[in-house]
Amino acid sequence: MPSLFSLAGKTALITGSTRGLGFAYARGLAQAGAAVIINGTQAEHMQSALAALETQGASARGFLFNVADEAAVEAVFKQLDEENVHVDIVINNAGIQFRKPMLELALSDWQRVLDVNLTSAFLIARTAARRMVARQRGGKIINIGSLTSEAARATVAPYTAAKGGIKLLTKSMAAEWAQYNIQSNAIGPGYILTDMNQALVDNREFDQWVRNSNPSGRWGKPEELIGTAIYLASEASNYVNGQIIYVDGGWLATL
Ligand SMILES: NC(=O)c1ccc[n+]([C@@H]2O[C@H](COP(=O)([O-])OP(=O)(O)OC[C@H]3O[C@@H](n4cnc5c(N)ncnc54)[C@H](OP(=O)(O)O)[C@@H]3O)[C@@H](O)[C@H]2O)c1
């Protein structure tokens, strides 16, 4: 049974993985046997993430680049090509939040959030999938959605539009790439304790709302996302395609 979930011999690129959920995915995939390539934009975050992965005995390396920068993405994949490193698994995890009522929202802020949360997933998946198709050994694409892939809340319109887009971009990838034995799926995390949500945790009223509105009565922990990521990255999900799996403690079930 465990071999069904083994990632031994696989290489995984996880974007936005120097902290938070991305770092948890990187740790989990490495524990399942994958060599991991992590990514972020800040050198000090990269250093501490690589040091922690090294302590765990993981095979890990890192690239600092902005996921929304096409030239930077191409350069990373070119370098990997030159080193004969093939990416078997991509987790499009990098994301940013920006809270502002839509009536006050500037186009530049709308665009920035769409670029990092949605366009980057197209860009990186396309760049990786071109190589997976040429290599004829299939692959796994895992995009990261959110509860906002299903439901909206005030003040986060660009994030909501991007995460709604992730759900149908994932289906588009499945529709086009299933024929190449590439499975494209998404994870929709609920409210999870990471830096991105620190302001919400510190807000007593919001914190209480999360606890009261979730049938599990609590926030999720980053490590609670790892099992779903390993499943979607492994052979165990070879006939699962175009799905989004919510890991939310049951929050959406009560809507
Ligand atoms: N936390 C939640 O409750 C929750 C819920 C639903 C969905 N999600 C989604 O899960 C993903 C991760 O969220 P998180 O809470 O772990 O976020 P986080 O704690 O803010 O961490 C974000 C990570 O992304 C990196 N990053 C940010 N902008 C980047 C860019 N332009 N290019 C490359 N890397 C970039 C950061 O690296 P540097 O610091 O080095 O830049 C960091 O490693 C996001 O897509 C988010 O929307 C989170």
Image (cartoon, rainbow, N blue to C red):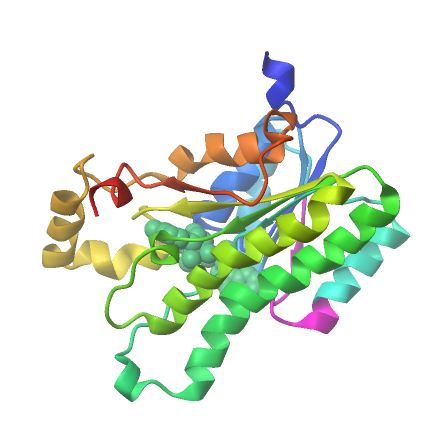
* Total count of labels: 0
Left or right: 129 as drawn, with respect to 199: right
Left or right: 158 as drawn, with respect to 37: left
Q: What stretch of residues is rendered in magenta?
A: 61-72
In the rendered image, which quarter is residue 238 located in? top right
Frontmost residue, 122 versus 87: 122
Whether residue 41 appears in this view of the structure is: no
Frontmost residue, 193 versus 136: 136
Instruction: Name the quadrant of the N terminus.
Output: top right
From this view, report whether residue 31 is shown above or below residue 122.
Answer: above
Whether residue 74 appears in this view of the structure is: yes
In the rendered image, which quarter is residue 153 located in? bottom left
Would residue 140 be counted in the magenta stretch?
no
From this view, report whether residue 226 is shown above or below residue 2.
Answer: below
**Residue 89: percent from the left, percent from the top?**
67, 42
Frontmost residue, 237 versus 14: 237
**Residue 12: percent from the left, percent from the top?**
67, 41
Residue at point 23%, 70% (across, down): 154
In the rendered image, which quarter is residue 140 located in? top right
Left or right: 186 as drawn, with respect to 190: right
Residue at point 48%, 33% (across, down): 228
From this view, report whether residue 204 is shown above or below residue 139.
Answer: below
**Residue 168: percent from the left, percent from the top?**
51, 57
Residue at point 78%, 65% (across, down): 75
Residue at point 29%, 81% (across, down): 102
